[in-house]
Image: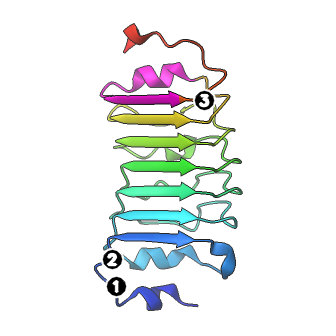
């Protein structure tokens, strides 16, 4: 199935949810041809890497939900996204492949139990960090590096010690 052809009548599409890529032989390169959407959500049991995704310059919000086999984020550097959501990605163990994202306004990491730090992320411009259900998260240093942080939410993080709020 050629999704670029299927989606061509929707040239002004602003939001796209791709659900369950396992239903088809899916090639993510079709996303390069769609330049109007700003919100992309991918839910897939099949997706394990992002090397197929390139040049998502118009995307502002990029969400990966219910991707149990997603293990790394290589290939995510060519996006203009400023807000990222990773939810229910149990094999995702690090976010360091996002180091080329210059403006990272918001990041939510929900129920990604292998994530224990935010190393490699440029958090200087980050306004919002949401971490929930990541029991081994320990990275208070990265939180302190988020100089413009307005909202911080940390829930269900068993290993994190008490945060010294005076360092913020």
Residue for point 37% across, 69% down: 15
Of tags 1 and 3, which is closer to the observer? 3
The image quadrant where one finds the C terminus is top left
Span of residues in magenta? 139-154
What residue sits right under mark 1 in the picture? Answer: 10
Residue for point 50% across, 13% down: 163
Between disc 1 and disc 3, whose residue precedes?
A: 1
Front position in the image: 54 or 3:
3
Residue for point 57% across, 49% down: 87
Residue for point 31% across, 83% down: 11
Distance between mark 1 and mark 3 Cα atoms: 40 Å
Regarding residue 27, the answer to whether it shows in the image is yes
What residue sits right under mark 3 in the picture? Answer: 156
State whether residue 138 is above or below residue 125.
Answer: above
The image quadrant where one finds the N terminus is bottom right
- State if disc 1 and disc 2 touch (CB < 8 Å): yes
State whether residue 95 is above or below residue 116.
Answer: below
Name the side, left or right, on which 85 lies relative to 49.
left
Of tags 2 and 3, which is closer to the observer? 3
- State if disc 3 and disc 1 touch (CB < 8 Å): no
Coordinates of residue 132 in the picture (x, y in percent): 56, 35
What residue sits right under mark 2 in the picture? Answer: 13
Distance between mark 2 and mark 3 Cα atoms: 36 Å
Q: Is residue 73 magenta?
A: no
Q: Residue 61 falls in which quadrant of the image?
A: bottom left
């Amino acid at each position: 199935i050629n999704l670029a052809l299927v989606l061509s009548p929707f040239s002004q599409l602003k939001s796209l949810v791709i659900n369950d890529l396992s239903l088809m032989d899916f090639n993510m390169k079709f996303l390069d041809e769609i330049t109007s959407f700003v919100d992309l959500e991918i839910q897939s049991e099949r997706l394990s890497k992002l090397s197929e995704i390139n040049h998502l310059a118009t995307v502002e919000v990029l969400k990966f939900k219910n991707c149990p086999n997603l293990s790394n984020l290589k290939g995510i550097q060519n996006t203009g996204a400023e807000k990222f959501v990773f939810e229910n990605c149990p094999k995702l163990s690090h976010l360091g492949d996002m180091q080329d994202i210059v403006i990272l306004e918001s990041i939510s990491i929900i129920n990604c139990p292998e994530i224990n730090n935010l190393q490699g992320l440029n958090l200087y411009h980050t306004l919002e960090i949401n971490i929930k259900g990541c029991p081994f998260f320990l990275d208070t240093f990265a939180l302190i590096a988020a100089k413009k942080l307005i909202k911080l939410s940390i829930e269900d993080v068993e290993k994190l010690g008490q945060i010294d709020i005076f360092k913020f």
